[in-house]
Structure formats: structure tokens, C-alpha cells
Amino acid sequence: MKETSFLEGLAKMFDRAAVVLGIPAGLAQQIKTCNAVYQITIPVEFRGDYHIFKGWCAVHHEHRLPTKGGIRFSPTVSQESIEGLAALMTYKCAIVNVPYGGSKCGLQINPHEFNEAELERITRRFAKELIKKNFISPSENVPAPDMGTSQREMAWIADTYRTLRPGDINAIACVTGKPRAQGGIAGREEATGRGVQYALREFFRHPDDASKAHQHGDLTGKRVIVQGLGKVGYHAAKYLQEEDDCRIIAVIERDGALVNEKGLAVEEVKKYLLETGGIAGYPNGHYTVDGKTVLEHDCDILIPAAASDQITRDNASRIKAPLIAEAANAPVSFDADEILKKSGKVILPDIYLNAGGVTVSYFEWIKNISHIRFGRMDRRLDEKRGSEIINAIEKTVGKQVPEEIRDRIILGAEEIDLVRSGLDDTMRLAYQEIRDVLLLRKNVQDYRTAAYVVAIQKILAAHKEVGL
């Protein structure tokens, strides 16, 4: 039997939640249908010839503006994948209370085949076409980095936008995920991985929820397998290991997997990966060339953080992890999701779990349009108040507060502190809203359906507010 496609799976998941809410069929169709798709074919001259590239930009829903989504450079980019990812962004933003609609842009290209100068020409040409059609704008559509792009490409796009729209005072807000010197924000690069960490922490704060995944206590000592040490998986694994004392027993990469039941040092593995281009030969772990089979190893938490459709109908029945945390977009296919649910696995879905990136992108956009960095107005005031509190305590008790405690209380919040605090709060509250659906609606039995219910309810509310 043919595997259900990504876009088909999204539609089925939406329909399942729409039935729970009793939405009229026509209204449900309007919400899940992509509003606009723009196909682009661009010629770029280099190496003594013209090279033709095809791309798409999809705007899924505009119940909130601007719309938000990443720019993806990958050979696997297609119109269907871009439409699906745009829809995912709509629901994701709604779940974490970020006031954006959903969008996605992508170019069908392997960025590793081009040098930096060629990539810059391609990126700027692509951006120019999107800007001309208002598919990049601080008030219409605000892209961010995605697979195959980074803050470097965002800086090129922002500069291209400023060149074409010199009178736009908010031009720097046309994209997020920029370098700090170009209007970026502290904590953006780590944001998606941090969000995974904060979501897992919140899950384990509820013993009844953790017990459904045969888990007890907090994250300490939990055996974790991570697929992908890229922007998301690396930060998730790093912080879970360093701050929550998780044991990363396996890392899966493109060239295979490393397994060490005693635990792998994430920072060392990442350094080795950057130096050699792979994980083969790393000395402190057992290497297997067929990395995907390690998804099936026994562990407490499985974090697929690489690509879509890693767990499908072919391998779903062999997955042993009782808790699957979807750090990538759609790593579990619709068909696999059905199999895993029937076997009692708990899945924290992508539309909630990896929303840390768009959350911090929202903070960056707010910073850009307000034209002031977070903490500039109140940091020293916080320090002054903290100092006054310490002085009052010391005067009252007649003893000095230990220097370590004094420093923590007096220290004013920097931008990174405020970003992490806002992200933590966002992931906690979003989880609690999803949890409430599970508790109050007896016909909802899984986190994915509950997350879609939360998203659709908010989109419906936005429609009613404007009389649609």
C-alpha cells in the first residue's frame, strides 16, 4: 500500500480535529486550503553560463498578518512540500500564540554544489522576485532560515530588501534569523532546540502525562536517541545533556550512527562532525553505517530532528521508544502515526514541539519594528532594585548575603535571558492548552489531535473577530 503523502496526511489530521469541533465542511475546507502559491523560475549567470532554478512560495492563511515561514534550499523542494509546510506553520503559530499566518518559500537547489559567491547571487535573485510580489515584507510575509539556509542568507535577503525598498523604516524586519549585527536577536540559533528542551521539561512536570509514556520522575538520567546534529538536534541534545542530565545514548547522522549506552559527549561529537564531515571513526562510540536502524533501538525518548518521513509504515512497528519528540517537521508519517498510537506510544507533535524557532523569530520581529533591543530600558533599573533588596535584607538580619546569591539577585536581565524566559513561558502555556483538550474532550486521545484542535479553535476565533 502506498504511503500517505505529507500534504495528504496534514489534511487528514486537520479533518480529524475538525470533526471533534463540529466545523461545517465548507469552513473547514476554507481554513485548510492554501490561499496563494507563487511559482518562480529564475535565471542566474555564473561559470560562463546561465543556470535556471525553480522555486515556490506559498501563503497558507492570512487570519493574522504578517505570515511567517522559512526559506528552504533543497533538491527535495516541491510545490506540494511547500504548501504542506506553509499549512504546518499556520497551525504552529496558532498553538504557541504567535500572531502570524503561515507561509513557506523554497528553491529547488542543492546549496552544497555552489560556492558562497554563487549562492549569494542565487539568493539575492530569488529574494528580488519574492519582494516584487510582496512575498517578502515586514507587514506581509516574514521568512526565516530553514533547511539549507542560515543567518548568512537572511542577511543577503534583508540587504536586497533595503535596496529595493529604501523608504521602509521597518526594512530590517523583512526577515528573521539574521546575524546579531544585522538586527538579529540573541538565542535565535538555539531557539528550536531550546523549545524542544522546554517542552519536554513541561511534559515531565505532569506525572500523569509522563506515566502514559512509562516514564517517571524528571528528565534526569533519561536515555535519549537524537537523529540529526544540525541546528535543532544539536541544541536539543546539548541542553538536555548539560542542564537536565539526560544520557544521549545514540546520535544518528547522514553517514551512520554512534551508540554508547554510557552516554555520548554531544559537544565532542559535534566538533568531530564539523571537522571530518561525518561521525564515522569517532572513537568513543560504536559506529553503525545503517543509521536509520538505530531509530528502533531501546531508549526512553526518541528525538527525530533531521528530516521528514523517517518513521513510516515500514519501520513504525519496530520503534521501541515509548516517547517520541518530533523536533523535525513531519518526521513521523501519517500512516506511522496511526501504528504508533495503537501500540501505545506517546508522540509530542511537530506543530507544538518545534515551534521554538518561530517563537523567537517573533521576538526578533518585535525587536526590529520597535527599533530597540530588549533590556535596554529596564536592565539597570532591575539591578538597582536588586541591590536595594539585598541592602534591606542585610540591614534587617544583620548579616551579609553570600556573594554568589547577591550577584544572582542584582544581575539585570540581558536579551538572552529575556528571550529564554519568553520561550520557556510560551512552550509551557502551549502545552497546558493542549493538555486541557486531552483532559476535557474524551473523544481526543492523542497530543497531535489535541494540538490541531487548539490551533483550529484559535483560527476560528480570529475569523469570528473580523466577521468572516
Image (spheres, rainbow, N blue to C red):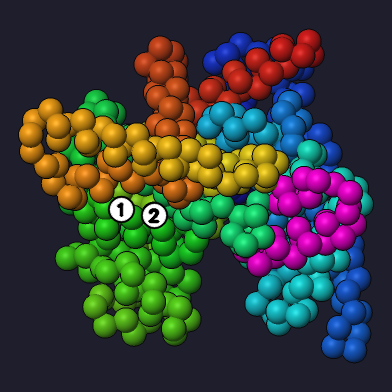
Residue 356: percent from left, percent from top = 50, 44
Report how far apart the C-alphas of labels 1 and 2 lie in the structure.
6 Å
In this rendering, does residue 323 appear at all? no
- Locate residue 261: give its quadrant: bottom left
Horizontal side of 447 relative to 66 (left or right) equals left
Q: Residues within 10 Å of mark 2 (few under 14, many from 20)?
A: many
- Locate residue 52: give its quadrant: bottom right
**Number of marks:** 2
Between 53 and 415, the residue placed more toward the observer is: 415
Numbered circle sitting on residue 236: 2
Horizontal side of 100 relative to 375 (left or right) equals right
Q: Which residue is mark 1?
A: 240
Point 44% across, 83% down: residue: 275
Q: Are marks 1 and 2 in contact (CB under 8 Å)?
A: yes
Relative to 83, residue 122 above or below: below
Residue 347: percent from left, percent from top = 40, 39
Residue 15: percent from left, percent from top = 62, 25
Q: Which residue reaches farthest bottom? A: 48
In the rendered image, residue 156 lying in the magenta stretch gets the answer yes
Q: Which residue reaches farthest left? A: 398
- Magenta segment, which residues? 149-175
Horizontal side of 266 relative to 391 (left or right) equals right
Point 71% across, 12% down: residue: 465
Tag 1 secondary structure: helix
In the rendered image, residue 164 lying in the magenta stretch gets the answer yes
Amino acid type, residue under disc 2 in the picture? Ala
> Magenta region, mostly helix, strand or loop?
helix
Q: Residues within 10 Å of mark 1 (few under 14, many from 20)?
A: many
Amino acid type, residue under disc 1 in the picture? Leu
Point 59% across, 32% down: residue: 98
